[in-house]
Structure formats: C-alpha cells, structure tokens
Image: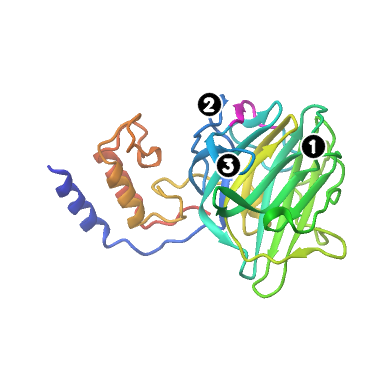
Amino acid sequence: MSRNSITAIVLLGTAFSLANRSRASVIAYDGFDYPAGSLANADGGVGWSGGWYQTDASGTPSGPATLQVSDPSLIVPQGTFSPLGGKVSKSGAGVGVRLLANPFSLAVDADYYISLLLRLDATPTSKDVSLELFSGSTGNVLNEVFRVGTDSTEYQFKMIGATGMAGPTSAGVGGDAHIGTTYLVVAKIAAHATTNDQAFLATYPGLESGATPTEPTTWTGLVPGNPSWAGNQTIDRIRIVGGAQFTVDEVRIGTTWADVIAPPPVECAGDINQDGSRDLADLAGLLAAFGSMTGDAAYVARADLDDNGVIDLGDLAGFLAVFGADCAP
C-alpha cells in the first residue's frame, strides 16, 4: 500500500472524531526525566515545542543547553508532590532555554502560576539563579518579561518584572535563600487587560514540615508601593540561567495553584504538537514523520507511540485509537 493510500485511509477514519477535545490548564511541565548527562536537546515533559537550547550573553541562540541532568530528583519540601525523573544543575554559569507549545498572553484578565524546586549548592561570587519568561525577540536579543529566583549579590529571593528589565525589582520579598536548602518557589502573575500586571511570590524551604501548601490568602507583592508593571506581552519561552552553582527541578507553569503544586502531569499520548488536544494537526505531524526511524531528521519521538524506534502503521493505529479523546488534565 502506498503512503498516499495510507494517508487517505487515516483521514477518512479520523474525520468523524473531532468532538470531545479539551486543553488542560497545565501550560508546561518538565521534571527532567532524562538520561544523565547534558540537557542539550532534551525533549520531554508536557507543553513544549522542541528541546532545550542555550543563548549567549545577549540572548542570541547559540547552541545546546549547558545544564547537566543527574539523578535523583531534588528532595521536595515535606507534604508536597513527589518529583519525577532527575534534576538539572550547573557548577558555575549555565543556561537552558525552551519554547512553549502554547504561548500565553499577559494582555488579558488571567492568572498564571510558575513553580520550581531550587537549591543553591555553594558559596559563589555570584549568587543568582533564575527562571525567566520571555516574549519573542528583538533582532537576536530575547525580550525578557519576568524573572523569579535569587539575587546576584544577596542570598535572597527576588522577582523582576517588565520587558528589558526596566520595571520594578523586588530583592528579598521571598525571604532568605540558604545554601544547600531546597525551596519550592511559587510565583503568580495577575495579568490585566486594561491595567498594570502584578506579580507575587511564595517560598517554602525544604526543612519545613506540614501538609501540601495551599495558596496564600495574602501574597508578597512585587514591590511595596509599586507592585505592578505594564505588560501586554505574549510569553513564548522560558530560560533557566545563573552564575551560581545551583540545582533546579520540577519546572511548572499553569493557570491555577493546583497546576503547579499537584503531582506531575502525564504526557498525553498522541498529542504530538503538545497543544492539549489530539487532532488533525497531530495527525499531520505523524504523517510527516511516517516511515522515519530514530536518528532520521524527520523522526519525532512523540509520534512513535509504541516506542519501537520507527514511525509505522502501529503508530497510526495507536493514534486512531485516541484521536479526539480528551487529554488528562
């Protein structure tokens, strides 16, 4: 049977299954469940477009991510979720960038939550490590919108908001950062369509006991007296970067507190483009990779549903079985 015949059969067989699709509120997740070694080009998790890469000092893409993957996961603060996979770290400066499959807008009335596990591992000259959100680029320079992490000169948590780093800064709002302690760091961006956006921060040290943390009734604002910035950007990528010796794990972005505190989301089999639904766009991606095998330029791991190293009829059959079905939230 020719490839064109296969395509026609699949299209006919799937044309009746366009209902019952939904998008989970988890925007992106990576628990770094990868083999030990370089993070370069690692392409797992949920909600991403492509693997991890790096940028140079100006933000220009310059090659694979320089962070390293190792086992086991960071030990999470007591009572929270169980981490998945490994962790990423760097002894000295390191950087990793990844594109979102579903960029999200700050020009609407919406709440967004970001969380990660973070640990400073030594006493370096530079004390900073951050998770940063970007909105595309101007020329070759990435447009930074928001940053959460530790301060470069003090062992304190901070947030910075606004494109070009011209907005308000909040060193110390999340408390002190102690060497060797794992923190669950949770930031919230309250985006507004017609007024300034706001950002909030909560941190939970690894030695803290108790149940899974609930959303604070009173958050720490970005800057006392000036807790907002004008932001109409669309966030399309993140960056993990720092000059400190650091370890990061369990990066999450969502639209609710539960999205970034709950157990890791399960990757949705058949959602090849990771947009939260299994539809004709995913079918097109599978067909484009049909016949390829591991190592080929056209090979897409998410299209290899049976993990046999070849995109074949077995994968088409597997995709048909789930086409149009909801992805688990």
Question: Residue 27: x and y, percent?
Answer: 56, 54
Q: Is residue 303 left or right of residue 183?
A: left
Residue placed under numbered mark 1 in the picture: 206
Q: Earlier in the sequence, mark 2 or mark 1?
A: 2
The amino acid marked with disc number 1 is Gly
| Figure colour scheme | rainbow
Identify the residue at the far left of this view.
1
Quarter that holds the N terminus: top left
Q: Is residue 5 magenta?
A: no
| Residue segment shown in magenta | 66-74
Q: Amino acid at mark 3?
A: Val
Residue 292 horizontal/vertical position (percent):
28, 35
Q: At numbered mark 1, what does the secondary structure look like: helix, strand or loop? A: loop
Q: Examine the rendering and report whether any part of residue 78 can be seen.
A: no
> How far apart, in angstroms, are the residues tagged by discs 3 and 1?
26 Å
Mark 1 closeness class: few <14, some 14–19, many ≥20 residues within 10 Å = some
Determine which of the numbered discs, if any, sits on residue 150 in the image: none
Most common SS among magenta residues: loop
In this rendering, the label closer to the viewer, 2 or 3:
3
* Pointer 2 with pointer 1, Cβ within 8 A: no
Label 2, secondary structure: give it.
loop
In the figure, 285 relative to 83: above or below?
below
Count of numbered labels shown in the rendering = 3
Q: Nearer the viewer, residue 328 or 94?
A: 94
Q: CA distance from mark 2 to mark 1?
A: 25 Å
Report the amino acid beneath label 2. Pro
Is residue 134 visible to us here?
Answer: yes
Q: Which mark is first along the chain, 1 or 3?
A: 3
Q: Which residue is mark 3?
A: 97
Q: Residue at x 53, y 32 (%)?
A: 40
Q: Nearer the viewer, mark 3 or mark 1?
A: 3
